[in-house]
Image: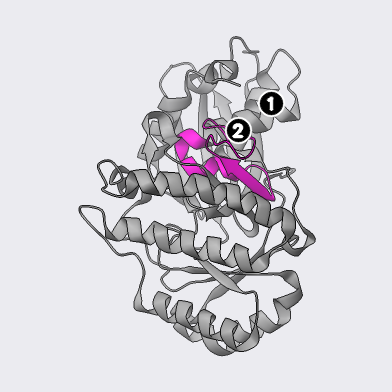
Amino acid sequence: MTAQDFILESYNSNIEKGKVKWSSPSNIALIKYWGKREHQIPENPSISFTLSNCKTITEVTYTKKANKDFSFDVYFEGEKNEAFKPKIQTFFERIESYMPFLRDYHFKIETSNTFPHSSGIASSASGMSALALCLMSLERSLSLTEMTNLYFNKKASFLARLGSGSACRSIEGELVVWGQNESTESSDLYGIKFDDDVHANFKNYQDTILLVDKGEKQVSSTVGHKLMFGHPFAKERFSQAHNNLAKLKTILALGDLDAFIKIVESEALTLHAMMMTSMPYFILMKPNTLSIINRIWQYRNETNSKVCFTLDAGANVHVLYPENEKDNILQFIKNDLATYCQNEHFITDYVGKGAQLIEI
């Protein structure tokens, strides 16, 4: 599908008011996306696990109005939040041509997270995807023709991408690919559910997120992505991501956990290496991040465990492991790794199925 396919040509203008609520999960990329072109188009493909417990819950109340300005209020964790408004204003401006009814309504956007905001657990991914899904539910109500679930999900992912690139990978699960590549079905415009063979080893995969730093990141992902322009290693990095995605497709089919570990950990460290070698350069990892990584390596060597780590654009560590190791790894985390977390706080999560409509 092309962007043109997502333009709403006509709609029912008689709906005066309504309310809709969605929960949408965060996701954790296995092959990392870093660097983008105009209109939120990724420089390289990525693939992610959709999570279950780490999610944003958003309720949108819409009321018909007379003037044609964008009109909305944002509430975060129950309190009015002016800081989020510029990002949503930009989002509305980007998607207006695909949703011309946006100027017809005043929106009350009430949102909350089950995890710390802006700490490197992809809160923008879950947040923008949840908002996109709420707006798609409104479009479905206004639509003059029947809308298929396939179209609904693709357009929701397309819109979410225009709010936050990785948000396009939060609509569905368990694995989602985003970014044109030759090894699997994909698109630059929206995320596509990975439907190739996945070995039982990767079913119900676990992700425990160690909250090394709950504070807001020193450098936003938006700034970080821009620093890939002119980066001396950018071209090789984009090529590496394509190659790693092709390798990971085979690994997922074969259930090769050792090869999975190598790809996933290398991708995490490469992401941060690109940050450390940009100009200006920056480091988002903390000393405790490195301590956790070294302890995971030590534990793996001592026990032959298949536990591994990955990192997003922040200091927190995602500890990934097969379901059959859940009890042992959680004990390891409680006994050994929790001490490196802020207030010994960590979140237990696992691979999920994607966003959910909440009945209200």
Q: Classify 10 Å Cα crowding around label 2: few (below 14), some (14-19), many (20 and above).
A: many
Spot the residue most to the right.
200
Magenta stretch: includes residue 186: yes
Spot the residue most to the top.
10
| CA separation in Å, label 2 and label 1 | 8 Å
Magenta stretch: includes residue 133: no
Q: Secondary structure at mark 2?
A: helix
Residue 56: in sight, yes or no? no
Q: Which mark is residue 151?
A: 1
**33 to the left or right of 35:** right
Q: Residue 349: which quarter of the image?
A: bottom right
Instruction: State the residue in front, 6 or 264.
Output: 264
**Going 20% across and 54% down the picture, which residue do you hit?**
280
Spot the residue most to the left.
280
Of the residues shown, which amino acid type is indicated by label 1?
Tyr
Q: Is residue 27 above or below residue 305?
A: above
**315 to the left or right of 141:** left
**Going 64% across and 87% down the picture, which residue do you hit?**
303
- Residue 97's x, y, as percent? 48, 18
Quadrant, the C terminus: top right
Q: Is residue 291 above or below residue 321?
A: below
Of the residues shown, which amino acid type is indicated by label 2?
Ala
Q: Secondary structure at mark 1?
A: helix
Q: Which mark is residue 156?
A: 2
Quadrant, the N terminus: top right
